[in-house]
Amino acid sequence: MPEPLLMKYVGRPGRDAVDEYVRTGGYEAAARALKELTPDDLVAMVEASGLRGRGGAGFPTGRKWRLTPKREGDVRYLVVNADEGEPGTFKDRTLIEGDPHQILEGVLIASYANRVHRAFIYVRGEMFLGYERLRRALEGAYARGFFGRNILGTGFDLDVTLHRGAGSYECGEETALLESLEGRRGEPRVKPPYYPAVKGLYGRPTVLNNAETLAHIPHIVRLGADGYKAYGPPILYSVSGHVTRPGVKELPIGTSLREIIFEHAGGLRPGRTFKAVFPGGSSAAILTAEHLDTPADFDSLAKLGSMLGSSAIIVMDDTTCIPAVIRRTVEFYRDESCGKCTPCREGTIWLSQILDRILDGHGRMTDLELMDGIAQQMTGLCLCALGESVPPALRASLTYFRDEYLHHIRAGSCDVVRAPVAAGGASG
Ligand SMILES: Cc1cc2nc3c(=O)[nH]c(=O)nc-3n(C[C@H](O)[C@H](O)[C@H](O)COP(=O)(O)O)c2cc1C
Ligand code: SF4
């Protein structure tokens, strides 16, 4: 197992101080990028590294940068998505609190590569500590000349603005985020244009990347594309739920779900058996024990009809009632729906009403087909991926755990035994 790149110093005190970051080689990659490489060299290097966005969609970062028009004299922006609202996801917050200069150094290099002179970091409203650390880190970096005018004597200028969101999941969707940043209600923009690359913030070409995505950039510059790839390439998995050692695990991308859960996250509580997992946050279709040997990467999980998403692995053992989990998940999307389009606004309400009925012991045999039909009518018809996120988990639960729904409908009660955790070994 190679040593961690992004998590190496997370957990050490004082990492928001610029001197401490510089002491461990911080901003050397940025200095090299600005002094020795051209913007085009950097775009090519990031493309060659194979880095794919860590915000959820897995779009190749180098390609996104190449797509952004770079006409001489045009104003362009860089926007960092640090909204991190996907249930089960806490890797951006861990980086922001634990080693914020990594993200700032990524912002500096990405701005130079994209010929951007103004960047915005959109920070989740509830990240109180993270915001403070990021603010302190930025202040220190400005004081040492890593931001502002004529950075490191290269003639390159860059200003960075921190912006706090108000705690809305939907504001993590890139066009809703831009609306919110411009001071309007956080609702997605109608597409096309499909990406902010051409028409983004204030109608200008905009590179929008996730916070973790940008934290990879200094390592790519420092190690070169091949050196970086030798680390996996790395990814941060947020592991939570019924495991004994939850937390952020930096591992080579494509580590199997089994290894992540049973080796790196300590396995299940004693005496419990594995039941199901969300492999990419609650927007990903749930998987079962038969899928545990699947590599946790973008393509392998997509083949199973699920996704890597924000790489948040939520583990459920045999004490879990799956219809109850799905109800809780649907309620989340119902409450966070911005209401702009009908399939999501109405579909999430209808689904949560039916799930209430089933879990309250008044379910009907026709309810499963009814829910499947609603999920079908939402698929491909929502304006953004929030509404599209509801059907996969619901439909997977209807496939893999149909018996649990049927038991609730027939018996009017739950058959999951929530026995006290017994002593003994965990099993997969
Ligand atoms: C409802 C919703 C919420 C999202 N929340 C986030 C988020 O909190 N952070 C994030 O980086 N991307 C989030 N995304 C994905 C962004 O729209 C976008 O794809 C991503 O920020 C692009 O960065 P990347 O290419 O570096 O992954 C969300 C998408 C949707 C539909
Ligand atoms: S899918 Fe939901 S969150 Fe997205 S625009 Fe439609 S109503 Fe709003």
Image: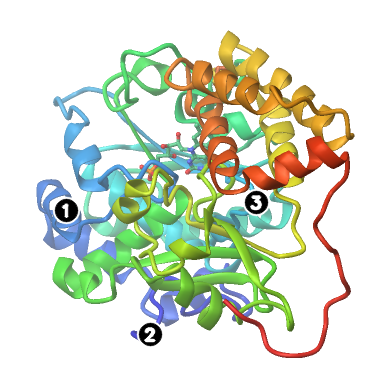
**Position of 7 compared to 410: left or right?**
left
- The residue indicated by pointer 3 is 131
Percent position (x, y) of residue 30?
Answer: 29, 62
State the CA–CA distance, disc 1 to disc 3.
29 Å
Count residues near mark 2 (Cα–Cα under 10 Å), then give few for <14, some for 14-19, many for 20+.
few
Percent position (x, y) of residue 314?
Answer: 61, 59
Q: Residue at x 20, y 60 (%)?
A: 33
Visible residue check, residue 234? yes
State the CA–CA distance, disc 1 to disc 2.
25 Å
Q: Secondary structure at mark 3?
A: helix
Nearest to N terminus: mark 1 or mark 2 = 2
**Position of 173 compared to 107: left or right?**
right
In the image, 347 versus 275, the foreground residue is 275
Residue type pointed to by label 1: Leu
Residue type pointed to by label 2: Glu
On the rendered image, what quadrant is the N terminus found in? bottom left
Residue type pointed to by label 3: Tyr
In the image, 235 versus 202, the foreground residue is 235
- The residue indicated by pointer 1 is 42
Residues at badges 2 and 3 in contact (C-beta under 8 Å)? Answer: no
Q: Residue at x 20, y 54 (%)?
A: 46
Q: Secondary structure at mark 1?
A: helix
Q: Is residue 343 above or below residue 74?
A: above
Residues at badges 1 and 2 in contact (C-beta under 8 Å)? Answer: no
Q: Residue at x 35, y 61 (%)?
A: 216
- The residue indicated by pointer 2 is 3
